């Protein structure tokens, strides 16, 4: 079980976003994809779930060529993948219980789990909230009634509810304060290990990557600049990576001042 890119190319008009990008993410790994804004990090994630198709090259999920799938095949691949976006994207008109349960009531979920009773749905929701360190006393509250950090965790619980094998995070700590950022990072790490899922995290935060990643992939000028372990990345002499590391160290020093 793995996600694999083979010489993937993608352009929008005259701008090349991905140019012969190749890498593989084995089962259970936490891979961070870093790079400057607009370098193709989120575009890479969208290829995994078939929201975008490469102009050349292939993307494989568990041996299935994503670009070659029909609607049924794409649905099957997306069922394996849980996408966590920058914003919580919860429905304000629904309770926390209803938001987290949303993915358990889709036709696709019913094909996997069957039709769950309300008590079974509630039990699953409570279990997923517990995984993200939330109590069941918020079940009947609506998103505007809880903090932004809690909304982020509810969003993560909603993603976990259908039981994905892959977690895809698109800038999960953007706009968060340092304490909430650390909480989200710890959750990504703990969930990846506890649930034995594969996690791909798109980020510009080298500090987060150094803390929880198994490997770090750096994109630059539409290509893979580096794919290495945390320790190898720390020792890198590539100028862009040194710049990322310098910013991280300076930020850490300001935090200790």
Image: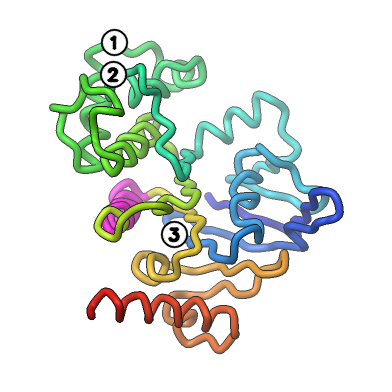
Q: Residues within 10 Å of mark 3 (few under 14, many from 20)?
A: many
Please say if the residues under marks 3 and 2 sit with CB atoms less than 8 Å apart: no
Residue 29, numbered label: 3
Left or right of 80 on screen, residue 53: right
Q: Which mark is residue 121?
A: 2
Disc 1, disc 2: CB below 8 Å?
yes
Spatial CA span between label 3 and label 1: 34 Å
What is the image's colouring? rainbow
Task: Report x, y in % for residue 200.
Answer: 49, 54
Q: Residue at x 31, y 49 (%)?
A: 191
Q: Confirm whether the magenta stretch covers residue 120.
A: no
- From the image, tell me which residue sits under label 1: 117
Dot placed on the residue nearer the N-terminal end, 3 or 1: 3
In the rendered view, would you say 67 is above or below 247?
A: above
Q: Which residues are magenta?
A: 182-196
Image position, residue 41 (x, y; %): 60, 56
Q: Position of residue 6 (x, y in %)?
A: 72, 58
Q: Identify the secondary structure beneath mark 3.
A: loop
Is 186 one of the magenta-colored residues? yes
**Distance Cα–Cα, label 3 vs label 2:** 29 Å
Tell me how far mark 1 sits from mark 2, CA to CA: 6 Å
Q: Position of residue 63 (x, y in %)?
A: 63, 46
């Amino acid at each position: 079980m793995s996600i694999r890119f083979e010489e993937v190319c993608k352009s929008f008009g005259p701008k090349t976003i991905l140019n012969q990008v190749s890498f593989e993410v084995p089962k259970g790994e936490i891979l961070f994809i870093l790079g400057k804004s607009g370098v193709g990090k989120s575009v890479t994630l969208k290829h995994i779930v078939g929201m975008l198709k490469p102009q050349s090259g292939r993307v494989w999920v568990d041996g299935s060529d994503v670009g070659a799938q029909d609607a049924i095949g794409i649905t099957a691949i997306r069922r394996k993948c849980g996408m966590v976006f920058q914003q919580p994207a919860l429905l304000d008109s629904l309770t926390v219980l209803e938001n987290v349960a949303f993915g358990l009531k889709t036709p696709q979920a019913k094909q996997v789990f069957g039709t769950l009773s309300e008590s079974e749905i509630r039990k699953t929701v409570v279990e997923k909230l517990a995984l993200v360190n939330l109590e069941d006393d918020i079940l009947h509250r609506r998103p505007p009634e809880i903090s932004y950090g809690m909304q982020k965790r509810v969003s993560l619980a909603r993603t976990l509810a259908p039981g994905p094998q892959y977690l895809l995070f698109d800038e999960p700590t953007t706009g968060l304060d340092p304490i909430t950022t650390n909480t989200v990072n710890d959750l990504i790490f703990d969930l990846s290990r506890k649930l034995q899922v594969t996690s791909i995290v798109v980020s510009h935060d080298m500090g987060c990557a150094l803390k929880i990643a198994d490997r770090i992939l750096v994109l630059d000028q539409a290509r893979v600049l580096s794919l290495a372990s945390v320790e190898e990345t720390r020792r890198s002499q590539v100028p862009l990576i040194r710049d990322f590391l310098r910013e991280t160290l300076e930020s850490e020093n300001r935090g200790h001042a």
